[in-house]
Image: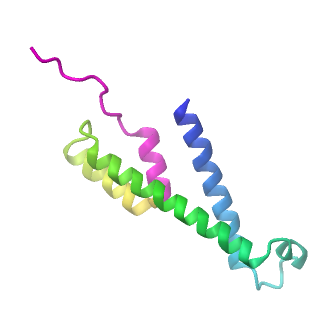
Amino acid sequence: MKRIAFLLIAIFLLISGSALVYYYVHWSDQSISRDILTAIPPITAAMLFLTLAMASFALWLGALIHLLKNNSILGTDRILWLLVIIFLYTLGAVLYFLIAPRPSLRRPIRL
C-alpha cells in the first residue's frame, strides 16, 4: 500500500513539475495562447515550482540516506544504486524506492 501511495505522489510531482517548467520556460513565447499563461500569476508559478523543487530534493536526499543505511545492498550494487540516484535525480530516487531490496526487519536471535 505504501509503495502505491509513494508511486502516485512521485508521478504527481513529476507531472506537475514538468507542467510548471513548461509554463515557466514558455512564459514569454508568443506562439502560446496568452489566456492560458495569464491564468497562473508568475509569483504563484514560482512558489509552486520552488515547492516541487524542494520536495524533489527531499526525495533525492532521502533516497541517498536510505541507501547508505541499507545493509541489504552491498558492494557493486550499492555503487550502482548510488550512481542511479545521483545521475537520475528524482527519477533515480523513485526507482530506488520502488525496486531496491528492503532491509530485513528481523532482528538476529541472541543465544
Quadrant hosting residue 44: bottom right
Give the image location of residue 34, x and y in percent. 88, 79
Q: Is residue 32 magenta?
A: no
Looking at the image, residue 75 sits to the left or right of residue 94; the answer is: left
- Which residue is most to the front? 111
- Which residue is most to the left? 111
Q: Quadrant of the C terminus?
A: top left
Above or below, 28 relative to 80: below
Q: What residue sits 55% from the left and 41% below the top?
A: 6
Q: What residue sits 65% from the left and 64% below the top?
A: 18
Give the image location of residue 39, x and y in percent. 85, 71
Q: Is residue 108 magenta?
A: yes
Quadrant hosting residue 47: bottom right
Give the image location of residue 10, x and y in percent. 57, 49
- What stretch of residues is rendered in magenta? 90-111
Give the image location of residue 80, x and y in percent. 30, 51
Quadrant hosting residue 55: bottom right
